Amino acid sequence: MNWQRLHGYLSYQSLMLGAVVLVTCAALGWAAQRTHDPILAAEAQDLRNNLSRVLPHGSYDNDLLQTRAQIDGPEGPLDVYRATLQGKPVAAIFAVHGRGYAGDIEVLLAISPEGALLGARVLKHKETPGLGDKIDVEKNPWITRFQGLSLGNPPVERWAVKKDGGDFDQFAGATITPRAVVKEIREGLEFFASHRQQLFGETLAAGESQ
Amino acid sequence: MSNYLRIAQDGLWSNNIVFAQVLGMCPTMAVTGSATNGLGMGLCTTLVLVCANLLVSMIRQAVTEAIRIPVFIVIIATLVTLLDMMMNAWAHALYQVLGLYIALIVANCAVLGRSEAFASKNGVVASTLDGLFMGLGFTFALTLIGAIRELIGNGTLFADAHLLLGSSFAFLETQVIPDYKGFLLMILPPGAFFALGFLLALKRWIDQRQQARQGIQAVPAAALGGGGCH
Amino acid sequence: MSETSVVHGPHAHAGPSLRRMMLEVILALLPATLYGFSQYGWPALFLFLTCVLCGLIIEALCLRLQKRPLRALGDGSALLSCWLLALSLPPWAPWWVALVGALLAIGLVKQLFGGLGQNLFNPAMAARVILLIAFPVEMTRWVQPLALGSLPAPGFLESLQITFGGAQTDAYSSATLLGHVKTELSRGTLLSDALADIYRPLQALLGERAGSMGESSSLLLALGGCFLLARRVITWQAPLGLTLGLALPALVMYLIDPLRYASPLYHLLSGGFMLTLWFIVTDPVTCPASAAGRLLFGLLCGVLIYLIRTYGSYPEAVAFALLLMNAATPLIDRYLRPRIYGRNRQGAALQPFNRRAP
């Protein structure tokens, strides 16, 4: 076929462009369909991995993803996951947000029905590498310090970094980041204290009836 | 045959996307905080470059002057979107590291540049090879910048390589300088400019020495000085 | 226009050489520097010597690489840049901070841009900012002044350990005034409480407080500055602009809410302001050439210092503000050009004096 002869027609150009768009759209549509389920599975696995990081393996036996519920959080709707062991509630897991040095810091908390912190992990942050990123457990075990603590232990006024007269270490050269994380966790515990019923929902009732 | 050799040499060194064309500055600056990230971004871009060059050279006879830019960009955008979806589905760990930057490959004008400057004028084999070597040259540049920044900034090389290449490549991860204090600046954005500046100077120095040795008059540095987009 | 007239060529000759000017600036810095040594002891001296020595070696290396005569080393510009840098470092910083600082100031900021007179940014201040971003821990570790020879001050060998051996100095550490106030304010403390037991204007004037050597004695720095003014090494426009630029916003905010915003005097006497006022904004290379330009430069620089100190996340802002304004200098120079000798502001030639009116 002599392509050059067709090039002069205006209709050829629009048809050509249309054909290319049609083919690429078809390719995209097909790929979107093929990847839809794997993407959902990968994201679910991702979430499951994150959730399991705040709770020790074996301390619960339900599929956390199935227990997702939405309640009214301090900043709009909040996703809560409820861990149970043989039907008894073990923990409520939810994320808290706060402003660090360079942006939002998202911390995932697991809190037992008694109000004790079972685990806390930073999910997302933009803190300075080498300084503020020590809140990430892969860089520094600092955040494991919070395990087992609750609002009364230490007393509320000591929920602060040492520089502010509290109990928690700040990092050399970075105070703002750990201060933000401590505040976030404290606020998370306070939110838990005032919304315990809602956070555990049905599972608490089920656990107590047994 | 020497024609293909020339394509390889162009892509890897003399007409390198970063060091000679100074194109694709957005990923060059943004994703080179570590050698691993640079390598990952480079490989993704290489894949897109090869596919784009292949497709464009295949349909080059059918595409007219007037519609070539929209056709090329649609093809490139589609390829990038496909790559994005596939990585999200089947290489999720890698996607979490590079995901934000994959979409930026569309805006990397080096890709459109190769379609326009080479693939639309050359045969399928030559274009595919051009895409491959341009991509490898880009990968080389990004990995080098990433390695320099990581080494000076952190004292490590190829940290987290297992996330990118699988656990069998964990041996790449090395702590080059033990107990290194870290030179934060090199990991932060200014470090990319410092590293690129010094590498550009180094390439010119090497080229000039080579030319001097071959006794050729120094070619006016036309390749440099052209600003990149993005 | 056929009538030709003879006018003298626009040649002016000035006595002082570059070398002489540099030496006079160094002379002006000397009292404050010596006082700094006496305040912060041997470690400060070691750090200072390391910084200056490294700077001179790097300058010499750069000159060699460029195949330029080593004579240029004698103009004192590298010495002055490193001197200023040393004055703005924490006095007890380890030796490698000084080495990297000298490398950045002389190698990167000065010589890579083309050497003396070609640099866009002030070498000392640019190096300080890069160091601060790169080594935030070392660059924010300040010590209380301990007079040389007094009992708690470290001895000679102990000081060698501090500068070269990486000895821990946490026992002596202390916050600077600006840093302390920033921390307290971010906790919600009232300014008056934050300042209560740390801020005394007289102390700030004399310089008995935590900070870098160049941040300590406002009085001695001002003395040196006045000497330079009298010797006409520096001009008055940029310092005046800087003072007004910082003091006016501070005054307005202080009058609005004295509980949250510090007084102008506090701003003028704290941090690296005095050093910048007399020795940095008066740098002929990186500041605008015309008198109006220098006034504007100082004014904007002062406003930036106030804004960054008050609303930024770093407690001290002088170096950041200065770099931003250095970057704006070519723009200022474009709009506020100095009048060319023999021409008016529009660039048209002036009427020669000895030409009679037609």
Image (tube, rainbow, N blue to C red):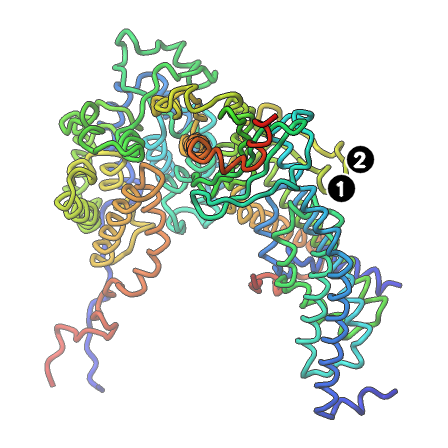
Asked if marks 1 and 2 fall on the same chain, the answer is yes
Name the chain under label 2: B
Disc 1 target residue: B165
Q: Give the amino acid at mark 1.
A: Leu
Say which mark, if any, is on residue A91: none
From mark 1 to mark 2, how far is it between C-alphas? 7 Å
When the figure is inspected, residue A73 is found, relative to residue B215, above or below; the finding is above
Q: Residues within 10 Å of mark 1 (few under 14, many from 20)?
A: some
- Specify the farthest residue to the left: C357
Task: Tell me residue A178's x, y (percent).
Answer: 44, 30
Circles 1 and 2: CB atoms closer than 8 Å: yes
Give the left or right position of residue C222, taking residue A59 as reference. left
Q: Is residue B110 above or below residue C64?
A: below
The residue drawn where x is 17% and y is 46% is C253
Q: Which residue matches tag 2?
A: B168
Residue shown at 73%/66% (left/top)? A28
Element at label 1: helix
Q: Quadrant of the C terminus of chain C?
A: bottom left
Which quarter of the rendering shows the N terminus of chain C? bottom left
C33, above or below B142, in the image: above
Residue B75: image location, x then y, percent? 72, 69
Pointer 1 chain: B
**B128 left or right of C41?**
right
Q: Secondary structure at mark 2?
A: helix
Q: Is residue A183 visible?
A: yes
Along the viewing direction, whichever of C29 and C137 lies nearer the viewer: C137
The amino acid at mark 2 is Ser
Depth order, front residue of A151/C13: A151
Question: x%, y% of residue B140?
Answer: 71, 49
Left or right: residue A141 compared with residue C218: right
